[in-house]
Structure formats: C-alpha cells, structure tokens
Amino acid sequence: MSTTNTSGRRKTAVARIYLKEGNGAITVNGKDYKEYFPTLPLQYIVTQATEVSGSAGLFDVTVNVAGGGVTGQASAVRLAIAKAIVELDPEKKPSLRAKGIMTRDDRMVERKKPGRKKARKKFQFSKR
C-alpha cells in the first residue's frame, strides 16, 4: 500500500496532508472538503492536482491546514497533494508543472513600514 506525507504552503497557510490508496475521499480538518471549502472555485482548486494527474478517485487524502484565509488554504492543499502524487509517481510531474500546480506561489503580504500608513501608502501631505 502506497502512502506519503507532504506539506504545501501559500501566503501564511500551511497544509500537511496524508495520502493513501483509497476511493478519492478528501478530509480537511476533520470535515469533508466540500463542507470546509463551500464554494465551487475553492473545491476545484483542491481537486485540481488529482484531476490533472489522472489520479482522481485513487487516493484518500487527510489534510490538516492552518493559517491564512480560505483561498490560501485551498492553494496550499493543492500544492501538497501535487507533491505527494509526484513522490509516488514521478512521471506525473510534467503534466502538473505545465498547469503551474507544482510551483509554490511565494507572494506574501508586504510588511508595514514605520512612518507609513500601510506598507507603501503615505500619510496625507499638508503644505500648510
């Protein structure tokens, strides 16, 4: 039986997944992924890696995800699932990379600077 554990990150969200052979059930923090990610675009992001690699319905995925918002969490889960699939079958990596699923999106929120209203926005200038 093939099992693997990987993690994926996006913004401040971190997803740890446990992938094992099964019938395609995805559980996120103890709930079904359709309950945890209620909108269709988020559900599509979560299942995208299995569909692109042709592994839909072959693996059961258990996910622990924390931090960030729902979009960042969904993208973190997608990256973790893709990394686990490639760990089990390296031949699926080119198809996942072509869709941009294997790339870790490293964009983060820029920190607030001192003397500024936000990260880049300045306080209003008054000449008099």
Image (tube, helix red, strand yellow):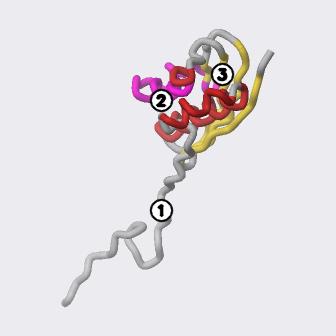
For badge 1, the amino acid type reads Glu
Furthest residue in direction top, as rendered: 23
N-terminal-most mark, 3 or 1: 3
User: Residue 40 placed where, x, y %?
Assistant: 40, 23
Query: Where does label 3 land, which residue?
Result: 61
Q: CA distance from mark 3 to mark 2?
A: 14 Å
Asked if residue 36 shows in the view, the reply is no
Query: Where does label 1 land, which residue?
Result: 110
Marks 3 and 1 in Cβ contact (< 8 Å)? no
Marks 3 and 2 in Cβ contact (< 8 Å)? no
Disc 2, SS = helix
* Res 22 quadrant in image: top right
Marks 2 and 1 in Cβ contact (< 8 Å)? no
Vertical side of 112 occupied by 46: above or below: above
Vertical side of 64 occupied by 117: above or below: below
User: Residue 115 placed where, x, y %?
Assistant: 42, 79
In the image: residue 30, left or right of residue 71 = right
Instruction: Please provide the residue range marked out in magenta.
Output: 28-49
Numbered mark located on residue 45 in the image: 2
For badge 3, the amino acid type reads Val
